[in-house]
Amino acid sequence: MCGIAGFADPLADESRLADDERLLRRMCAVIRHRGPDDEGVRVEGGVGLGMRRLSIIDLATGHQPIRNEDASVWVVFNGEIYNFRDLRRDLERRGHRFSTSSDTEVIVHGYDEWGEGVFNRLHGMFGIALWDRRTSTLLLARDRLGIKPLFYAELGGRLLFGSELKSLLATGEIDREIDPAALEHYLAFLYTPPDQSILRGVRKLPPGHLLRWRNGAARVHAYWRPPLDERPIGGREAEAALLERLRSAVRSHLVSDVPLGAFLSGGIDSSLVVGLMAEASDRPVKTFSIGFDEPAYDELDAARTVARHFGTDHHELVVRPDALAIADRIVAHFDEPFGDSSAIPTWYVSELAGRHVTVVLSGDGGDELFGGYDRYLPHPLVAGFDRLPLPGARRIAGAVGRRLPRGATGRRFLRHVARPPADRYIDAVSFYGPEDREALLAPGVRAGEALSPERRLAAVIARTAHLPFGSRMMHADLVTYLPEDVLTKVDRMSMAHSIESRVPLLDHRLVEFALSLPLGLKIHEGVRKRILKDVGRRLLPEAILTRRKQGFAVPLAVWCRGRLREAFSDVLRSPRLRQRGCFQAKEIDRLLDEHLAGRRDHELRLWQLFMFELWQRQYMDEARQSPDAAAIVVRTA
C-alpha cells in the first residue's frame, strides 16, 4: 500500500514551512499512482513526512502520517505489517492507547516500547520513515527481502527520500548525472546495484537495512541478514514443517479490507499459493493469467488446469505484439533503466488484475529459495566437458578461447568452461560481460575494475564459501537478482495500476527456514525444487508438478521481426543516441546487423539498449528541455 516521500534539513527555518509543504506535496503528487485514495503530509522543524495512500486496512481511520500518544513520534509507511494485531495486543497490555485500527500505528507505539528493535518485530513488507522529535532523529527502514523500495539522497546534510526516484527528482535538487558504475551494472545484469541508482547522487536503502539521520549526518546499517547455515533434517520432517510455514505465510497475507486475488502462471510457486489461498478462503479465489499467441511462451493451459482444480474465479488475457504501445509507460514507472523484458507481461497481468481487485498474491521467491532456475544445474555440455579425462582441460579451453576472434563459434563456451564455479555463475547471469562492455561503452565511460559488477557479485558469493555451491548460487540470487529485478518489476508494474502485490513465499520466517534446509532437499538427482514438489503433491495436479519450468518471458524474437524490429533500428541508429557519447556506434551497428540478418541472437542485449535510450529521452532529454524539471516527472508518471 502507498508511497512515501519526505526530507530532513538540519538548517530548519520556521519561515519556510509553507514552501516546505508545497515541496512535500509535489514529491507526493508524482507517486499518486501508488496511493490514489488519500494524501497526508506533516512538516515541522525542517522535517517533512508525506504519503499517498492505497487504502487496504482500516479504510476509515488509517490516514497517515500517524503519531504516538504525545505526538513526539510520527511515521509514514508503505507496505503491510501482517502481525500487527499480535503486536497491538502486546502493546495494549503494556499500556499503549491506540486511536486507529491500522497496521501503521503499531510502528510508532512499538518504537516507543522497543526503540529501533521494533523493526525486527515487524513481519511484512515495508518502507518506513519515522521522525522522533525528542532526539531529532529520522529513521528510514526497508523490509528484510527488499519487497518495497526506498530511495534517498544526501545533499550537504539535507536528506531526501521516497518510495520512487521520481519523488526526489520532483524537488529539482538532484543532479541528473549518470553513475558509470550503475550503468555498467545495468548492462551486465539488467538492473542497477542494490545500494546505488542510475544517478550518481541517489542511493537505494538495501533490503534489511536502517538509515539513521541526525543533525545532518546519515548512517546506514543492517538489522537483518539472511542466515547462512544449513542444518540436517529428515525429508518427512522437513516437508511437514515447510507445509505448516507455507500455510501460515499465505493465511497471514490474506488480511485485507478490500478485494483480493492472485497472479497465476501455472508454475508450481503461484499454483501452491493459489491452492493454499483456496484452502483458507470460504469463497472462490480470483486468479489472473496472461498468455501469448506463440505456443512456446504460452502458459494458459497450465493456469487453467490449476484454476479448474481449485474452482477459482479465473480471468485471463492474450497479449499480442504491442510492446511498443506501453514501452514509454513502463520506462516512466521504473524511473531507472530496467532491461528485463518480463516487465511487459507483468504490466499486462497487473492491468488485468486491477480491473477486479486491489490486492494480489504472487509466487515470487520460490526459485531462489528452493532451487528453481536452470542455472542451478550444470548445462549438459558443461557437465560433459567436466567429465573429460583430460588433465588441464580448463587451462587448454581457456587458452584456445582466448585465441579465437571475438564472435567466433565456440569461443564463449570455451571461455565459460575454463572458469572456476563462481565465475561460471557470474558469466551465466551476465548479458554484457567485461569484454562486451569495453567494446560497447565509449572511452571514459567505464567505471573501473574496482567497481565492476562482476567484482561486486563475486564479493557476495565469497560470503558463502562454507556452503555447497548450489546453495551459494541461490543465496546470491536471493540478495541481488530477487530484490533488484524480480521484486522491483512486480512492485513498479503493480503499483502502476494501483494494486498491491504480496509475496507470501518471502515471509522472513519461511525464508529463514528454507535457507536452513540442506541443498539435497532442494536439488536432488537433477530434480529442482524437490521438497516444494513433494509438498505440492498434497495439493496440486500431477501435471503441474511434472511440467517443464517456463519463465515469465515474452516472445521478443518473434516480435522483433515486426514493429519492434523497425523500432530497434530507428532508435538504436538514431543520431540522438549517437550524440550522447555513452556508446560506440560501430558496436551497436554490429549487434543490430548480426541480429537482423539472423546470424546471431542479440534480442535481449538490444532490448537493454532500446530501453536505456527510451529512459534517456524521458529522464534526461526532456528534463533538460523543460524549465521546470519536476514538471516532466509528473507528466511521465
Image (cartoon, rainbow, N blue to C red):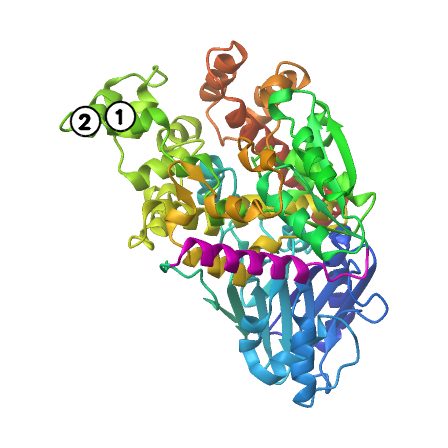
Count up the numbered dots.
2
Looking at the rendered structure, the kind of residue marked 1 is Phe
Is residue 51 toward the left or the right of residue 177 in the image? right
Q: Is residue 450 magenta?
A: no
Position in image of residue 289 (x %, y %): 71, 36
Position in image of residue 584 (x %, y %): 46, 25
Q: CA distance from mark 1 to mark 2?
A: 8 Å
Position in image of residue 574 (x %, y %): 60, 21
Q: Quadrant of the N terminus?
A: bottom right
Q: Which one is in front, 333 or 291?
A: 291
Q: Which one is in front, 342 or 565?
A: 342
Which residue of the protein is positioned furthest toward the left in this rendering?
391
Q: Is residue 255 magenta?
A: yes
Q: Which one is in front, 592 or 7?
A: 592
Looking at the rendered structure, the kind of residue marked 2 is Ala
Answer above or below: position of 489 versus 69: above
Say which residue label 2 marks.
393
Is residue 340 toward the left or the right of residue 263 in the image? left
Residue neighbourhood size for the residue with mark 1, other residues' Cα within 10 Å, grouped as few (<14), some (14–19), many (≥20): some
Q: Which one is in front, 429 or 404?
A: 429
* Res. 11 visible in picture: yes
Locate residue 10: give its quadrant: bottom right
Query: Main SS type for the magenta part?
Result: helix
Mark 2, secondary structure of its residue: helix
Is residue 298 toward the left or the right of residue 390 in the image? right
Mark 1, secondary structure of its residue: helix
Say which residue label 1 marks.
385
* Res. 622 visible in picture: no
**Residue range highlighted in magenta:** 233-258
Task: Give yes or no for contact between labels 1 and 2 (Cβ–Cβ under 8 Å).
Answer: yes
